[in-house]
Image: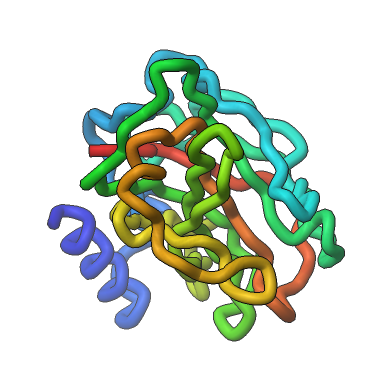
Amino acid sequence: MRIKAILAAAAVLIATGCGSLKNYPASALEMAEGGPDYAIYGFEDGTRHDFQLSTAGDGNSAFTGFVNTQERAYKGSRSLRVQCDFNGVDTGMGGLIKKAYSSPFQDLTGKKITAYIWMPKGSFTEENPYGGSFYFKTGEAYQWYQSEWQNLNVPDGPGAGLWTKIEAYSSEFALPPPPYGTGDPITADALQDVREFGVKVGQGDGAKNFQGFIYIDSIDIK
């Protein structure tokens, strides 16, 4: 990929001291791919695609606001800038944005879901990271199913932050594990009746608190 070549060149300059890193675009150091954004929710139209703030059943509410912005993007020129308050208590361990579906509800059988999350340098350490995941709410009871936690990245060298790709297949979603649920895999019926879809960023156990901005971009379901 083009981005790998750019990052390799930047790494050489860091190691040898040749050249000047200030000549490299921020996208090279932040692992942004660039180019057109063809994701179903790419935010290139200047809107939020009707995403809203959400809370989990346990009250997780670390996202306090968000806007469409041109400040940075994984692809295209726009993304969501999300204001966060991860404060290490039960009501601040996770932040969520949701997309609610009106009838007819969504059949997400056999889908692959991807998104890109930018975290700023210093927001956490490699030993105690934050993570990203997706969730569905299905059926009349709005049953919660979730994908597996995926560790997010932050730079240990130049760069204000890093983009991390998170992805999951709809067939791999499951009920929360004990003691919050049974951990059973999502059912075929549930996949045919998805009433809410969301992206969650969670504060890992032992991870330090963080107040500031993150960015979410290129959310795709295909």
Q: Is residue 70 above or below residue 5?
A: above
**On the rendered structure, is 119 left or right of 107?**
right
Q: Residue 134 location in percent, x, y? A: 47, 51
Q: Residue 219 location in percent, x, y? A: 38, 38
Which image quadrant is residue 120 in?
bottom right
Residue at the (20%, 63%) spot, across then down: 4
Q: Residue 87 location in percent, x, y? A: 84, 60
> Looking at the image, can residue 178 be seen?
yes
Residue at the (82%, 66%) spot, across then down: 88
- Residue 114 or 180: which is nearer the viewer? 180
Residue at the (73%, 50%) spot, across then down: 57
Residue at the (45%, 16%) spot, across then down: 103
Say which quadrant the N terminus sits in.
Answer: bottom left
Q: Most extreme residue toward the left, as rendered?
A: 1
Q: Is residue 222 above or below residue 134?
A: above
**On the rendered structure, is 31 left or right of 182?**
left
Say which quadrant the C terminus sits in.
Answer: top left
Q: Residue 129 location in percent, x, y? A: 59, 74
- Residue 222 or 123: which is nearer the viewer? 222
- Residue 158 or 1: which is nearer the viewer? 1
Q: Tell me, what colour scheme is on the image?
A: rainbow
